[in-house]
Image (cartoon, rainbow, N blue to C red):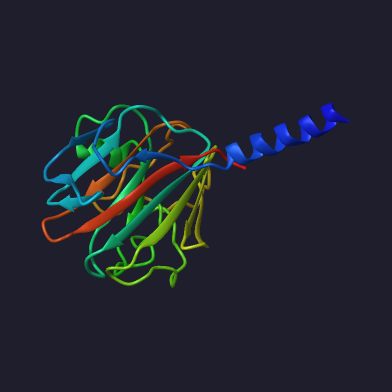
Amino acid sequence: MKQFVFGILLLTAMSASAQTWRPIFDGKSLEGWEHVGPGQIVLENGMLKTEGGMGLLWYTREKFGNCVLRVVYKTEKEDSNSGVFVRIADKPPDAWYGVNHGYEIQIEDKEDEYHRTGVIYSMVTAKTGASKGPGEWNIMDITLKGHQIFVSLNGTEITRFDSTDPNIPPKKKSFEPDRGPRPESGYMGLQNHGQNDVVWFKEVSVRALK
């Protein structure tokens, strides 16, 4: 009986551990992060703040395969622009490497259906209505599962993306990412976009898939 109870407790502990969020930004320093490109992302009052751009602050310590990434952010204005990059193939030598060798989950509430918050930038559309207004915190959960990416915003799923989908639209603008496969394990990063685009991040965490 004792062994049975111990086994139940062990399974419960393992299950709880699998659901634990592990911060990769601790609110105290930029240890483990590196910036490339113009502008910067600075540490201010325990948060990351974008300044100028276009640049990329990427996490150097590990590549992320199947997992869920959580990013908690707020914007200064409705058209403040930023993004979360995933599946970056290798260490980025410049900000554009992540664009063309990774996927960007867009942050920007005033663009069209292929370029607004929650989309895999220019490759799929996202549902609307889940973003909170400027100055309010948003919780973005990005589920990475093989060649699929699911994006939830404030508890509502808004994007489902499959990189093998034959209906992904072709690249139409020079600033859109090159099409083609990305690895199923890659680096992640945060974008600082332009001089007038201010976005704050207070949490960047990861947990295992359920």
Could you say which is closer to the camera, residue 188 or residue 87?
Answer: 188
Name, please, the residue furthest toward the right.
1
Residue 130 found in image quarter = bottom left
Residue 81: x and y, percent? Answer: 24, 59
Could you say which is closer to the camera, residue 39 or residue 176?
Answer: 39
- Does residue 171 appear anywhere in the picture? no
Q: Quadrant of the C terminus?
A: top right
Q: Is residue 127 left or right of residue 25?
A: right
The answer to whether 130 is drawn above or below residue 87 in the figure is below
Residue 83: x and y, percent? Answer: 30, 51
Which residue is at a point 59% across and 38% down the rendered structure image?
18
Residue 199: x and y, percent? Answer: 24, 57
Which residue is at a point 14% across and 51% down the rendered structure image?
51
Could you say which is closer to the camera, residue 120 or residue 63?
Answer: 63
Residue 160: x and y, percent? Answer: 52, 54
- Does residue 168 appear anywhere in the picture? yes
Which residue is at a point 19% across and 59% down the rendered structure image?
198
The answer to whether 198 is drawn above or below residue 66 in the figure is below
Q: Quadrant of the N terminus?
A: top right
Number of numbered discs: 0
Residue 194 found in image quarter = bottom left
Residue 119 found in image quarter = bottom left
Q: Is residue 94 left or right of residue 102?
A: left
